[in-house]
Every structure is written in C-alpha cells, then in structure tokens.
Image (tube, helix red, strand yellow):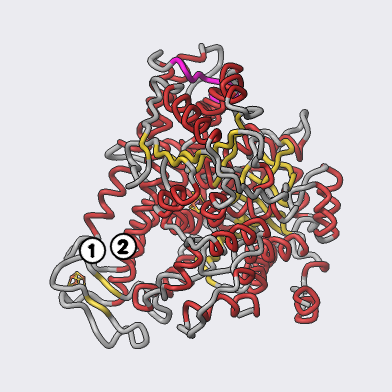
Amino acid sequence: MSDEEKKLKPVSLEGKKVKEIDYRDTTTCETTLQMLQKVAADGHETAIKRAFDMKPCPIGAESACCKHCFMGPCRLNARDPYSRVGVCGATIDTIGARNFARMVASGGAAHTDHGMGMLDVFREVINGNIKGFRIKDEKKLRSVAASIGIEVEGREVLDVAKDLYKELERTYTQVEGEIPFAKRVPAKTLETWRKHGVVPRGAMREIMEIMHRTHMGVDQDYENIVKQCSRTALADGWGGSMVATEITDILFGTPTPHVAGVNMGFLKEDQVNIIIHGHEPLLFEAMIAATSDPAVTEKAKAAGAKGVNLLGMCCSGAEALGRHGIPHAGNFLSVEPVIATGAVDAMAVDVQCIMQSLATLSECYGTRFFTTNPRCKIEGATHIEFHEHEPEHAPNEIIRLAIERFKNRPARVVIPSRKDMGVHGFSHEYINYMLGGTFRGSYTPLNENIINGRIRGVAGVVGCTNPRVKQDYVHVTLVKELIKNNVLVVQTGCSQIALAKAGLMKPDAAVLAGDGLREVCETVGMPPVLSLGSCVDNSRILIACAEMVRMGGLGDSIADLPVAGCAPEYMSEKAICIGQYFVASGVYTVFGVTFPIVEGTKFHKLLFEDLEHQGFGKWGFAMDPYEIARLMIAHIDKKRAALGIMGERERKLFSMEDRRAAEG
Ligand code: NFS
Ligand code: SF4
C-alpha cells in the first residue's frame, strides 16, 4: 500500500480513532477539496465524511454473507471459508458466486434498461410519433445496420431504420438465439462463447434467469453460476450498452474530437447555472435545445443574468462533453461539493449514481433539485417528469425555476477558478479515421504501431471515483504510468474526467509518454489518452478490440490482443458487470478499492486464474496504482510474447529504481 493509500484507508478500514478528516487526504482535485472544506465549515456532510464515519462491514466487503432466504441471514468465516456452510448447506463458493451474479444482474439491468429507453425513442421517432428528435447521423445508421447484415444499398433511410429497430429489439426480448451484435464479435471469440454456452439471448431473459438461479436452492455450482454471469454481462456489453451507444450516435450524432473544458471554473457568477447529472442523454439533449432558444436568454436577462449556463456531471455530462463540447463540472465525488459553491441554481437528474444526499444538501444551499425520470424519484426533490413526446416541457419548467432561484441567490457564492481544457469526443470510428487518414481509414496503422513496438498495447481505464480512496489519485497515477510505458490509454466515465482535470487529454501531454507512443501521438496530433464518453460507451472499446482483431497481425481473438482494462476507483454494480463482460470478451481486467470475494476460494481461483485457461480474460485486483500498472503491463507483454512481437526495447518492465523516482 502506498503512503497515499495509507493516509485514507486505515481511517475507515482499520478503525483507528481519528476524529478529524484532513480533506487534503481525500482528493487530488483542488476544486473539490476547496468545496469539501467549505461544506465542512458550513456544518454539512458529504459522502467522504460519511465514509470516514462508517466502517465497511468486513463480512459484506468480502461477500461472505447470504440473505437470500429467511433461514438466514448466514455469515461464513472469511478467514477460514470452508469451516462453515449456510443453514441450507451453501458453501462459500456458492454464496460468493450468487452475490456476484446479482451484482452483474443489477449492473447489467441498469445499462440495458438505459439502452432500451433509447430504442423506445428511436422507434417513436421513426414511427413519426416524436417530433422533438430526429435521425441526425444517417451514415452511422447505415453502418450499424450493415454491421448486422441489414441490406442498406440504395434503400431509404426510414426503411433501413425500421429494419434496424426490429433487429435490435431482439437484444432485449428474444427468447432463443444469439443477440444481433454477436455478429460483430471476432469469430474465434464467438467460438469460445458458443463452446461454453455463454452467447446471450435477450437481456430480459438472461437477467431473469440470473435472479431465478440465485434464488435459495437453485444453482449451487459456482462454475455454472459464473457462466450465467458471463452470459448476462455480455448481454450488456455487446447488447444493451452497445445499443445505447449506437442509437444515441444515430439520434444525436457520433462524437468527433473537439476542445472542451472540465471543472468547476465553468460555473458563471453572472449566469443562471444549471447542472444535468445522470446517464441518459435525452434530458440533456432537450435542455441544450431549450437553452439555445433566444427567448430563454431574454427571460434570464430580465432576471438580471447574462444568460443560462448549462453544465454536465457524471455520465450524462461525459456524453454532452464528447458530443457537444458542453463543459463538465466534475465526476462522481464532486457532485455534492459543487452544490456548496452556492452558484448552482438548479440540478436536474435522471437515473443512476445519484446520491440521495443531494436532495438535502441542495436544500442547505438553496439549489433547486429536480428528478425527471419516473424510475428515479427522491424524497425531498421536486419531480418534473421528462416526456420524450413533449421534450421541451420539463426543460422549460426547470429553466423557469432556475431563473427564479438566480434572482434569490444567496449573497455568498464561491466559484473555484480552475478550468481544464482538453480534447474530447473520440469514437471508434474516429480512431479509425485519425490513424488511417481519409483514404485508408482503418485500424491497420494502430496494429502496425503495436507490432513494431512503438505502442506497447492499449489499456482501457474507466469507472467511478469512490470515497474509500483518494479521489482521482489512482486514476491519474495509473494512467501516467501506463503512457510512460508506451501504453495507449482509452477512457470513459468518471475516470476520463479525472484525467481531463490532470491535463492529460491535451496533445502536448504526449511529452509524458514513452518515446514510441510519443512519436505516434506527435505524428497524428493526438493526446496519449483518448476520451470516449460515458460508461455505456465502453462498448466503443469492445468494437475497437474487434476491429484490431479483424485488421490482422494481432491474433485471432480478443483474448490474443495486447490489451488490458481497469476500474481503479470503482463503486457501482455497473462496474462489476462491465468488468465481467470485458473478462468474458477476453480482456484482463484489474479492479482497485476492494473486491467482493474471499481469497483462497475456488470461486476466486476461477475468476482470477481459470477463466483465462478457458479462452476468456480474467480478473485482477490491486489498490496501488503502480502495482496495477505493473500487472497490466506484464499482461500486455505476455500477449506480445505469445504473438512473437516482443522486441528488445520492451523486455524490461520498469525497475524498482524507476518506480522510486516516479514516487519521489
Ligand atoms: Ni459509470 Fe456513470 Fe461515474 Fe461510476 Fe457512475 S457516473 S455509468 S457508475 S460513478 S463511472
Ligand atoms: Fe443461509 Fe442458504 Fe438461506 Fe443463504 S440461502 S440465507 S446460505 S440458508
């Protein structure tokens, strides 16, 4: 454990009696720190304070308990896991695997329900029932349709769209057979899935089956449960999440790189500030349309403001940042602190990662807090429902109330000054174009640069921030270590916001990269860290992997590629599902913070070792960013060696001296 980690971890985990938090130990984000200190001085609470006060339950942390029936709850001894079984006889492997499966089901349900919502809107748009949205990216529509075998040549847009809808609906509802995007999976990877019986049917069926199989007295073979974990997780990655990404691109445009800003400095003292926080792009898109109406600016002016200033947070923010260049105020752990600026006139949320505490904290600072989705109401919030058929209604109402609040803003508003500019809005299509150029757009140059060793491999660094570790520290330290070792990094979700704040999304951050990666970045003019969007946009990483396999020279399956993934500060069940679909797709995936498993069990061995021998990827775990980097790079090198592309230059992993110098 590094000194950085020791500072925070022991406080909550080892139960030392430390009475005061030193907020400098809880985040590396200077604006969040400033606001955390302000919240504390104002006598209010945040998740960081609550995490400090609440020691995690050690049995739950290792997933060694079961409450799937009322003969229990049963607690097993995590130190001596095979010494006891549950009242029904369930072993630690059954209990661990069942708990894990339910996390996968919940995380997968979140993404697939989001994707289904997008598909609902797509259907209503093409049936002419929604006028407020339209098909914006016809090229993308055609390429997605063609990728799953729909005829596109010479056909009307609407006809292609109708066929696409019909096909993609199967992602959710189909009772038998493989989901449509299975057609995008490299042949050998698909063969492995078929061999092990994990090709997903419809997501509804897979999630239902997990809930059934994890009921008391059903599936009590951890290996069989893990198969269903993979199948359900794949129904998210290559199913629900991929549908969400592709349909959102079709309706609102595929992102292309542009310069945009991140951090709390984008709040404006003289404007009505509205933050959109959550995950589905619809509310945000409708807000963008509403605020671009000159009549809205006039109303704001009448209230003494210069205009309405829209900002995003978390994943809806990441999408609006990547697609439209709307500034992003911060990642998950900054959502409470930003309220303390007093400058947020309204915060409107839809679904996922919305802390209940926001309702009370907003009240403390006079911020108007709105829920907008029928699936997510919060006690104490004002609910103004967003309707796709009338998308301007909720935004107009939210803007009206935000303007009202601006007029009554408290005298003391503190806006941190920091703004971080960077390049956002990469997509798998753009990576293709960027590296290949207009005439030979393809992943060939990426593969060539990997084969010749300029780029050692590709790492996806994604996921949340978590009050159990110092905010942004693990993300930033890990990514710096990876690029220094010539690993190209792609990012999504809250992680990319951490790196954007650290300045790594600028092309001149290439100076921090190793010689080979630096040369590629400088030739192309790209940053060494590419921001791809929200967490459902992890599906872009899957497609990029499939393209790398298709271009040739790097093996026959995703499991052959010199790639690795990591969520070093994760907190949500969605992250567990994402991790499992990357593992099932063939990627070595390392998680930080904590892992809900008992070490030394058969279930642990399956996830962390044996899945790889079956042709999948596998899980890894470490908390220290240098250790995580070491694990990921060692894996990338192992794959390079197997491909026979291990040149002289990358034989030596960074030494202890290098590491001390880096930490020094
Ligand atoms: Ni992903 Fe997005 Fe952030 Fe974590 Fe939450 S916002 S879906 S779960 S916290 S990265
Ligand atoms: Fe205990 Fe078995 Fe019931 Fe779980 S299912 S609570 S292990 S008796």
C-beta proximity under 8 Å, tags 2 and 1: yes
User: Upstream in the sequence, badge 2 or badge 1?
Assistant: 1
Identify the residue at image location x=64%, y=75%.
4
Residue 111 place in picture, x, y as percent: 42, 44
Percent position (x, y) of residue 81? 32, 83
Quarter of the picture holding the N terminus = bottom right
Q: Secondary structure at mark 2?
A: helix
| Label 1: how many Cα within 10 Å (few below 14, some 14–19, many 20+) | some
Residue range (magenta): 131-142
Crowding near pointer 2: few (<14 within 10 Å), some, many (20+)?
Answer: many
User: Residue 59: image x %, image y %?
Assistant: 34, 77
> Disc 1 marks which residue?
219
Q: Quadrant of the C terminus?
A: bottom right
> Which of the pair 309/80 is nearer the observer?
309
Q: Is any atom of residue 194 visible in this view?
A: no
For residue 225, which numbered disc appears in the image?
Answer: 2
